[in-house]
Image (cartoon, helix red, strand yellow):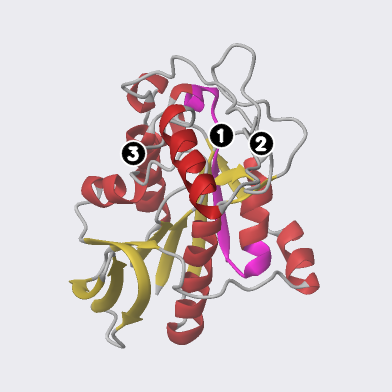
Amino acid sequence: MRIFVCLKQVPDTGARLEARPDGKGIVEQGFNFVMNPYDEFAVEEALRLREKFGGSVVVASAGPARVQEALRTALAMGADEAYHLKDDGLEGAGPLGIALALSRIAKQAGFDLILCGKQATDDDSAQVGSILAELLDLPQVTVVTKLEVDPSGKKALARREMDGYAEMVEVTLPAVFTANRGLNEPRYPTLPGIMKAKKKEIKVLDLASLGLTASEVAAGFSLLNMKTASTKRLNQIVKKEPAEAAADLLNFLREQAKAI
């Protein structure tokens, strides 16, 4: 079984981000970039499927040179091959453009099953996996918390947990699945795995090699402005009897905090 995994490099979820002075993005210095946490679940599930059925795990990502750090992490976890789409034309790309490029890489690399994280923790668009399935004309199951592939390799059973209920979905393969928290517990790269990953080739592609141009992957929208959220907290201590304190709190929430 050949399993294709899409991953993204994002700012560390514990990092404090600052908007650039021009309001067109974030200041990228002063914190670490990591593999998107939901994509870690996708990589881990791919490795488990390979361990069960044999085959290979291929990971792919798009972005600047630093993206190779995330790909190396996936290789250190045990992935077999890696593709890096690196092109200045990706600067203005949106979810549709990225999915289009990934679909071309997937066709080039070959696949029996595709895994993605359910969303990226930086933009939270949660679109790439679904668009990828549409472009490849494949069935899809999103926010998957359990995945069982039939020994025949022709179908799979996926569990989705929604607000207040869960559903089991059966699909024919190949298909696209987006991984949610709870699907598995991602492994840590071992020292031997890290050393092997350093020697593995990462195949670098550009848009032209995929038959694409910057205009074809450009987003149909533009970021007008981004501001750093205020961290100023308005604290007030009320030292009164419970009934009076409750009345003051109600007044504060209504008149100052505008919460009710």
Which residue matches tag 3?
100
Q: Which residues are magenta?
A: 75-91
Q: Residue at x 73, y 70 (%)?
A: 193
Inspect this view and state whether residue 160 appears: yes
Residue 201 shows up from this direction: no
Q: Nearer the viewer, residue 22 or 256?
A: 256
In the image, is residue 151 above or below residue 19? Answer: below
- Tally the numbered discs: 3
Q: Residues within 10 Å of mark 2 (few under 14, many from 20)?
A: few
- Residue 226 as seen in the image, left or right of residue 195: left
Callout 3, which amino acid? Leu
Task: Please tell me which of labels 1 and 2 falls first in the chain.
Answer: 2
The residue labelled by disc 2 is 65
Whichever of labels 3 and 2 marks the residue nearer the N terminus, that label is 2
x, y percent for residue 20? 63, 19
Magenta stretch containing residue 47, yes or no? no
- Residue 44 falls left or right of residue 202: left
Which residue lies at the image location 38% right of the left edge and 59% below the top edge? 110
Q: In this image, 13 relative to 170: left or right?
A: right
Query: Is disc 3 placed on a helix, strand or loop?
Result: helix
Tell me if mark 3 has few (under 14), some (14-19) or many (20+) residues whose alpha carbon lies within 10 angstroms of its own. Answer: many
- Residue at 74 percent across and 59 percent down: it is 199
Q: CA distance from mark 1 to mark 2?
A: 7 Å
Residue 48 screen position, x and y as percent:
50, 79
Marks 1/3: CA–CA distance: 14 Å
